Amino acid sequence: MVFAHGFGCDQNMWRYVAPAFEDRFRTVLFDHVGAGASDLSAYEPTKYETLAGYADDVVELATAMGVKGGIFVGHSVSAMIGVLAWKKAPELFDRLVLICPSPRYVDDGDYVGGFTQAQIEELIDFLDSNYLGWSQAMAPAIMGNAERPEFGQELTNSFCRTDPEIAKRFARATFLSDNRADLVDVTARCLVIQCSDDIVAPREVGEYVHRTLRHSELVVLNASGHCPNLSAPEETVAAIKAFVGDD
C-alpha cells in the first residue's frame, strides 16, 4: 500500500491510518518534493508545473520499491495524482483509494467544484503574497472540526514547514487543475471516501468522481472537514479495510 499525502501536508498525516495495515501489507509512505523531509534540490519548476510531474514521482517510487498490483491511497490532490500515476503505469496498482478527491476545484457549468474562478484566483493571490498568513487563515477552515482546534493548528504547522516557494507553485498546479477527463479511462477498482461536510471537496464532487469512474464505491463518512485521515482515522481505516477485504 502506497500512501500519498495532500497539499501542505507530509507523510506524518498518515500516522493514525497506515499502521492499521502494516500486519497485512507492506506500507510505503513518502513526502512529495517540497514537503516534509524531502530533498528540495530535486525540485524542478518545469516538471512540477502540473500534477503529471508528481505522478511521475509516484511511478518512479513504486517501481523502485517493486510494487505490482498494489493499492494506492491518496488524500486530496494526491487522489488525482494517483489516477494519473495509474494511467502512466496501470500494472503498479490494482486499486485506488481516493480520500476527499477533486478532479476540478472550479465550478464549470453543471459541474460543482466548490469554488468560482474568482475565488480560486483570490486564494492563489493571497497565498502568493502572504504564505504564512494564508496558512494560518486557511488551515483551520480546511481541517474543520472547530471543536478540536489542535487539528487546525497541526495543519497550520504542516503548511508552515512546507517550502513556501514550492508550495505556491504546487497550489497553482492543484487548484487550477482539471482532471475530469482522466477519470473516464480508469479501470482499476476505486474507493471514493467523502466527508459529510468538506469546504474543499464538497459532496457533489465526491459523487461526480464516483459516477465518472467505471468501477468505484462511494463511502460518505460522518466526519467533517477535509482531512479525515487525521480527524477521523478510525472511520477512515474502517472504510479502507472494508474495501480491501481479506487480501
Image (cartoon, grey):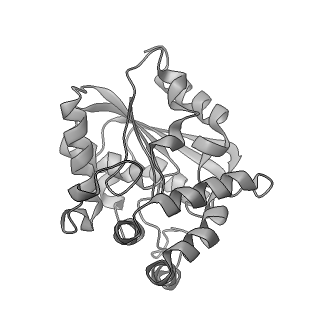
Image quadrant occupied by the N terminus: top left
Image quadrant occupied by the C terminus: top left
In this rendering, the answer to whether 116 lies above or below 39 is below
Q: Can residue 197 be seen in this view?
A: no
Residue 58 at x, y percent in the picture = 27, 43
Q: Nearer the viewer, residue 190 or 177?
A: 177
| Residue at left offset 38%, top offset 47% | 37
Residue 235 at x, y percent in the picture = 65, 34
- In which quarter of the view is residue 65 placed? top left
Q: Nearer the viewer, residue 170 or 95?
A: 170
Q: Can residue 121 be seen in this view?
A: yes
| Residue at left offset 50%, top offset 42% | 12
In this rendering, the answer to whether 224 lies above or below 17 is below
| Residue at left offset 74%, top offset 56% | 149
Q: How many labels does the image show?
A: 0
Q: Nearer the viewer, residue 28 or 215?
A: 28
In this rendering, the answer to whether 130 lies above or below 97 is below
